[in-house]
């Protein structure tokens, strides 16, 4: 009887320790216990894991995973679009957090084919960020910290939503890069941020998530504000190239704004800081109206 009771208790403890969550591919990710060795294949995922207190469990990550500073000490397993499979296998992770549009579907499938447990992260809406934070919290056993971080994010988002709910609309061109000229469509997370701040993405109707556009298309749309985020925190020189088009409303009113790419390009908890910067820029544009 005692042996039977011991087995029952052991089985109960094992079941209780199991964790699960559904990823952005709609797959149910199940682990026998909280993930202890994690490979993060995206900077935003690395930031999320640190935000919930699981940063010390990341045994491998990719280039540009540099926040917080402790993330810079984690061994690299490649870049977001080219990973070293052998090195990842050698790290023996019990969870890999992948980025669908960044790593690519082929990479994600290859990782699965190698027998690895892969959680796919692909936030497209602002509310997807705190939801993903909570799901990673479940998979790492950091539920309380994750709920706290998610709650703080949601409060800041709600504050911005209230502040700019009735703000006059500002037509916006968001420029990611200059050669080729790349922007975002309406399904991109950045476009959702623009909408949150009372802006309208002039290229929201394009089909590609990050489409290429020409100067003529921008001139024809005549945005009231141009927002640019290059590769680092420095204002990109190509933003100033728009000044040659003096008739452009954004140029005529001095509405050429630079944003820190780490705060707006990454779907991390710091996106609320990027959203605040976008809202500030659009409000400044409104104040330039005649």
Image (cartoon, grey):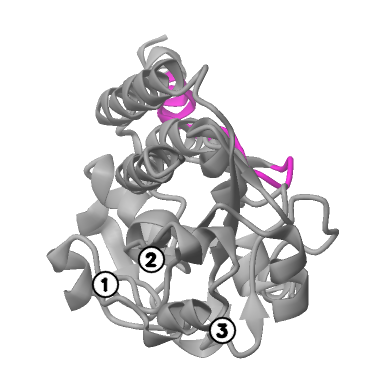
Is residue 199 shown to the viewer in this render? Answer: yes
Between discs 3 and 2, the one toward the N terminus:
3
Q: Position of residue 165 (x, y in %)?
A: 51, 18
Task: Give the image quarter of residue 92.
Answer: bottom left
Q: Which region is colored magenta?
A: 10-27
Asked whether residue 20 is drawn in magenta, I would say: yes
> Residue 85 — which label?
none
Q: Residues within 10 Å of mark 2 (few under 14, many from 20)?
A: some
Q: How many marks?
A: 3
**Which of these two is toward me, 102 or 218?**
218
Q: Are the residues flagged by discs 2 and 1 in contact, CB closer than 8 Å?
A: yes
Q: Residues within 10 Å of mark 1 (few under 14, many from 20)?
A: few
In whole angstroms, how far apart are the C-alphas of marks 1 and 3?
16 Å
Residue at mark 3: 178
Residue at mark 1: 233
> Residue 261 — which label?
2
């Amino acid at each position: 009887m005692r042996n039977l009771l011991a087995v029952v208790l052991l089985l109960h403890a094992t079941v209780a320790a199991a964790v699960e969550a559904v990823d952005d591919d709609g797959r149910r990710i199940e682990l026998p216990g909280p993930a202890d060795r994690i490979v993060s294949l995206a900077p935003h995922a690395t930031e999320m894991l640190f935000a919930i207190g699981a940063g010390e469990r990341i045994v491998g990550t990719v280039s540009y995973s540099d926040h917080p500073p402790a993330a810079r000490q984690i061994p690299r397993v490649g870049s977001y679009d080219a990973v070293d499979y052998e090195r990842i296998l050698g790290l023996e992770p019990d969870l890999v957090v992948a980025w669908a549009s960044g790593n690519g579907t082929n990479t994600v499938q290859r990782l699965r084919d190698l027998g690895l447990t892969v959680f796919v992260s692909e936030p497209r809406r602002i509310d997807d960020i705190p939801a993903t934070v909570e799901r990673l919290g479940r998979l790492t056993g950091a539920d309380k910290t994750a709920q706290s971080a998610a709650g703080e994010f949601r409060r800041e988002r709600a504050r911005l939503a209230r502040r700019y709910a009735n703000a006059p609309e500002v037509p916006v061109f968001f420029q990611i890069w200059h050669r080729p000229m790349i922007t975002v469509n309406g399904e991109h997370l950045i476009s959702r941020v623009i909408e949150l701040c009372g802006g309208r993405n002039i290229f929201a109707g394009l089909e590609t998530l990050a489409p290429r556009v020409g100067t003529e298309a921008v001139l024809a749309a005549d945005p009231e504000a141009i927002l640019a985020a290059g590769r680092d925190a420095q204002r990109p020189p190509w933003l100033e190239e728009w000044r040659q088009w003096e008739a452009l409303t954004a140029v005529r009113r001095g509405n050429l704004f630079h944003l820190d790419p780490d705060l707006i390009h990454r779907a991390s908890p710091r996106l609320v800081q990027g959203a605040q910067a976008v809202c500030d820029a659009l409000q400044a544009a409104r104040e330039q109206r005649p």
